[in-house]
Image: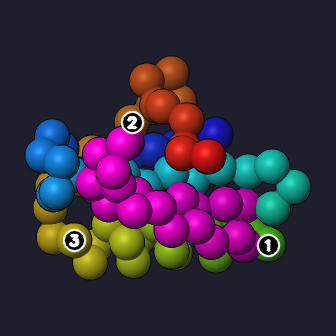
């Protein structure tokens, strides 16, 4: 995993997480809600630039004060 963003809300219905990861291709994973009941969406990209544009779209669309987490503190995206 490369980076994770979190909207800073703990609530089960309003929490949002976005992960940027790279295996062979770049992956963006977004979860709305908590880890048990949240809805997960996934996208794949050929370049880091395309993946980061999607992350920006997701973070800006929510309007919350998102926090970027360092690689050390970041959790893994949902399976």
* Secondary structure mainly formed by the magenta segment: strand
Q: Is residue 51 left or right of residue 65?
A: right
Q: With respect to residue 47, does 13 lie above or below?
A: above
Residue 27 x, y percent position in the rendering: 67, 60
Q: Mark 2 or 1 closer to N-term? A: 1
Residue placed most toward the observer, 79 or 27: 79
Disc number at residue 62? 3
> What secondary structure is found at the residue carrying circle 2?
strand
C-alpha distance separating marks 3 and 2? 17 Å
Q: Residue at x 57, y 53 (%)?
A: 20
- Nearer to us of marks 1 and 3 is 3
As drawn, which residue projects farthest toward the front? 37
Residue 7: image location, x then y, percent: 22, 51
Circle 1 Cα neighbour tier, 10 Å, few/some/many (<14 / 14–19 / ≥20)? few
Picture residue at 54% right of the left edge, 45% below the top = 78
What span is in magenta? 26-45
CA distance for labels 2 and 1? 23 Å
Q: State if disc 3 and disc 1 touch (CB < 8 Å).
A: no
């Amino acid at each position: 995993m490369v980076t994770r963003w979190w909207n800073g809300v703990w609530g089960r219905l309003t929490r949002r997480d976005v992960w940027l990861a790279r295996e062979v291709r770049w992956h963006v994973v977004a979860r709305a809600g908590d880890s048990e009941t949240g809805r997960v969406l996934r996208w794949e990209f050929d370049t880091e630039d395309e993946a980061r544009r999607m992350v920006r779209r997701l973070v800006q669309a929510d309007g919350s004060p998102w926090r970027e987490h360092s690689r050390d503190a970041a959790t893994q995206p949902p399976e």
